Amino acid sequence: MTTIDLLPGLTAFSTLRGCTDPEAPYDGFNACHYTGDSPLHVEACRAALGPDIVIPRQTHSLNVAYIDSPGMPEGVDALVTTRPGLLLCVHTADCVPLVMADREAGVIAAVHSGWRGTVGRIAALALRRMVIAGADPRRVVAAMGPCICPDCFEVGPEVAQAFRDAGLAEAILPREPRPHIDLPLAVRLTLMAEGVADSAIAPPVGCSRCRPDLWFSARRLGVNSGRTLTAIALPSRP
């Protein structure tokens, strides 16, 4: 796994595939239960995560849920908790996985931010839910896991227009024959607009499409493929 360095005592990581064939859509570690993989393979992978896990069924929504027990919430794309030891997980295969923490307040979040969620500013919605739970954006640290890089993320004009309409035109790269989108930059700008310091936001650890040997990529493998898991947890109480 790739460890995400947030603050001492926090658990934060993204999984690596550990595959033998990068072109095989489910080869490697995959704990996602709704993209067509064998249930036995999914359960075997989940067993390595322990019992206190939250794995939502994501739908590219703007839904944020406060979580206080393990489970598999439906139709949720961002999770927030103050419960120690609870592992909040999101799945991605090119979208941006984002984890956030206010260690002093004991509040964390895990966010799945695809282009629709990014346009809808789901990162900001999750941060605002963290604030309700006691977080202060000035104390929040954030990190992005592996996702598609701007060179790989070519989009149609309608997607580029959606970013303009959302006030995120800075994330549009005017390439030919079609524009590209810098998703991590759009997420960063969204967090900064909410009061998170630029220096407190860590960039992605790599590109999922460039490195299918390390992470799953829907643009390479199709939507019926595995997913990279990104997770965060507060330290368990003694």
Image (spheres, grey):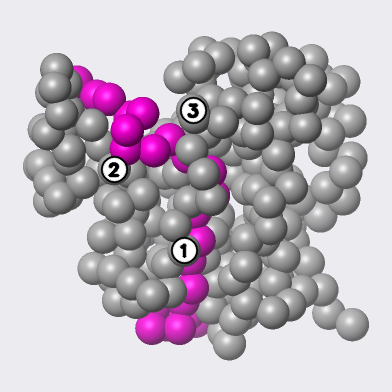
Q: Tag 1's secondary structure?
A: strand
- Tag 3 or tag 2, which sits nearer the N-term? 2
**Image vertical order of residue 28 relative to residue 108, above or below:** above
* Of 102 and 130, the residue lying toward us: 102
Quadrant of the rendering where the C terminus is positioned: bottom right
Q: Amino acid at mark 1?
A: Ala
Q: Give the residues drawn in magenta, as a range.
A: 132-156
148 drawn magenta = yes
Which label is found at residue 182? 2
Q: Residue 231's spot in the image, x, y percent? A: 66, 53
Which of the numbered marks, if any, corresponds to residue 211?
none
Q: Earlier in the sequence, mark 2 or mark 1?
A: 2
Element on which disc 3 rests: loop
How would you rate the neighbour count of disc 3 (Cα within 10 Å): few for under 14, some for 14-19, many for 20 or more? many
* Left or right for 10, reference 95: right
The residue positioned 69% from the left and 12% from the top of the image is 24
Mark 1 surroundings: few (<14), some (14-19) or many (≥20) residues within 10 A: some
Compared with 37, 123 (above or below) is below
